[in-house]
Amino acid sequence: MKTPQKAPIGRPRGFDTDQALEQAMRVFWEQGYEGASLTDLTDAMGITRTSMYAAFGNKEDLFHKALERYTEGPASYGARAMREPTARQVATAFLNGAVWATTRPGSPTGCLGVQGSLAAGDPGRNARDALAAWRNEHTSLLHDRFRHAVDEGDLPPDADPGLLARYLMTVGNGIAVQAAGGATRDDLQRVADMALQSWPSA
């Protein structure tokens, strides 16, 4: 005699949350926080608003989750660059990664972290602040890495780790803006190569 199976507790979701979040990330990346309407998001995710709220929270909650996914996916070149053995290699990997990520075939151009909410009214203020904090965090990580390089003698003792970090982030952000404006990968790679010509040597 078969043992009767217990009915599952709760109703299983009828969609792949991972895939839905991927689609939401792409919408925010392409349209920005304020430009992405709930209809745009739910249409791309293939779910209803009710399902979106149940799985991800409100639009702002969804944006934060999408930014986390972006950081761990397309923008993961930043974390990988930090592991390079020398400061010059860190800088090279960071800018090359920025060029690759912002011009990747089949993906939106530019950078979610740069263009996601540069100009925002009151409804998008929190998203704008979150992205500013995201960029500042990455600048701080570069700063710490370059300060370590100065201490190790990999950078000259008069090198300014904070200025180098800001320089790299400014060039990387500029690459993203140019990519969103239609600049080609080859053109942007040449920009990255030129920026590295002035990198200090120990």
Image (cartoon, helix red, strand yellow):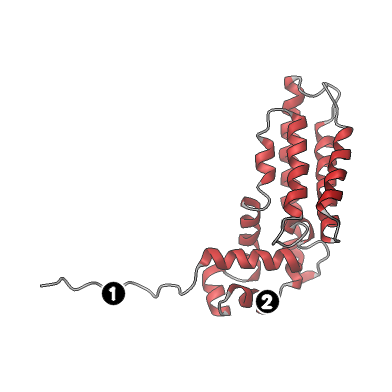
Question: Is 127 situated left or right of 12 in this image?
Answer: right
Q: Is residue 80 above or below residue 157?
A: below
Q: Position of residue 43 (x, y in %)?
A: 62, 78
> Mark 1 is on which residue type?
Ala
How many marks the image carries: the answer is: 2
Pick the residue in front: 117 or 21. Answer: 21
Q: Position of residue 5 (x, y in %)?
A: 22, 72
Relative to the observer, which residue lies in front, 137 or 103? 103
Residue 161 position by quadrant: top right
**104 shown above or below 45:** above
Q: Position of residue 54 (x, y in %)?
A: 52, 73
For the residues bearing labels 1 and 2, Cβ distance under 8 angstroms: no
Q: Is residue 39 above or below residue 143?
A: below
Residue under the image location 58 percent in, 65 percent down? 21
Task: Tell me the quadrant of the picture where the N terminus can be found.
Answer: bottom left
Point out which mark residue 40 bears: 2
Q: Amino acid at mark 2?
A: Asp
Residue indicated by mark 1? 7
State the residue in front, 135 or 24: 24
Q: Residues within 10 Å of mark 1 (few under 14, many from 20)?
A: few
Q: Quadrant of the rendered structure where residue 111 is?
A: bottom right
